Image (tube, rainbow, N blue to C red):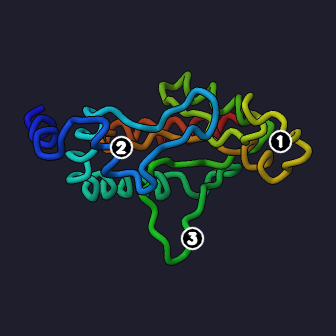
Amino acid sequence: LGDLIKVMREKGTDKYSFLTDNVTRGYYEYVNKGNSYVQSNINGAMGVTQLARLNAMNAIRKEIAEFYLSELTGIEGLDFLRVTEGADSNWHLFGILVPAEKKYWIMDALRAEGVMCNVHYTPLHRNRYYKDLGTDEDFPGSMQFFNQLLRLPIYPSLTQGEREIVAEAVRKVFSQM
């Protein structure tokens, strides 16, 4: 909390100053109904203090991703999102690609093992606000990706023991398919 208060003192807490000093056009606009992307002063101060730890947190997530890849590569029916050659990932998520017809069975089975895996990247046209963009048939690539993608836990405080539990649960679930 001390760092948070220090940042707020140094950077200020006045919302009007924030808007006029940091928005190049001097105003903001709403891009759709009901949303404002101006963060609170406290969230901004917390973000500034977290930036100091960004490289360390990214390194831990990379270590977790490398662990998952080493433990799970070679499991039949399981694939992974790829990092483009020459690029770096901050590993903000760890995606696994699974057989589409088994996706929700796998998700439920992993959750039964205590692993909170989630669906990710819901196609835009499936969101209520964008429903007029089209149907599933209009976006076959997006739907194929969505139908196969699940997300495993990956966050800096994930312990080695928890990582091993995730890997063991994935091995167990895929052995039951």
> Is disc 1 surrounded by few (<14), some (14 to 19) or many (20+) residues within 10 Å?
few
- Please identify, in this view, whether the residue under mark 1 or under mark 2 is nearer the observer: 2
The mark nearer the N terminus, 1 or 2, is 2
Residue at point 54%, 65% (across, down): 83
Q: What's under tag 1, amino acid-wise?
A: Leu
**Residue hosting label 2:** 19
Quadrant of the snapshot with the N terminus: top left
**Closer to us: 137 or 149:** 137
* Left or right: 11 as drawn, with respect to 86: left
Seen in the picture, residue 13 relative to 82 is either above or below; the reply is: above
**Residue hosting label 1:** 133
Residue at point 15%, 37% (across, down): 4
Badge number at residue 84: 3
Picture coordinates of residue 120, whole percent (x, y)? 62, 39
The mark nearer the N terminus, 3 or 1, is 3
Give the distance between the C-alpha atoms of the residues marked 2 and 3, in whole angstroms.
Answer: 37 Å
- Residue farthest right in this picture: 137
The mark nearer the N terminus, 2 or 3, is 2
Q: What's under tag 2, amino acid-wise?
A: Leu
- Please identify, in this view, whether the residue under mark 3 or under mark 1 is nearer the observer: 1
Q: What's under tag 3, amino acid-wise?
A: Thr
Picture coordinates of residue 52, whole percent (x, y)? 20, 53
Query: Would you identify the image quadrant in which residue 156 lies?
Result: top left
- Please identify, in this view, whether the residue under mark 2 or under mark 3 is nearer the observer: 2
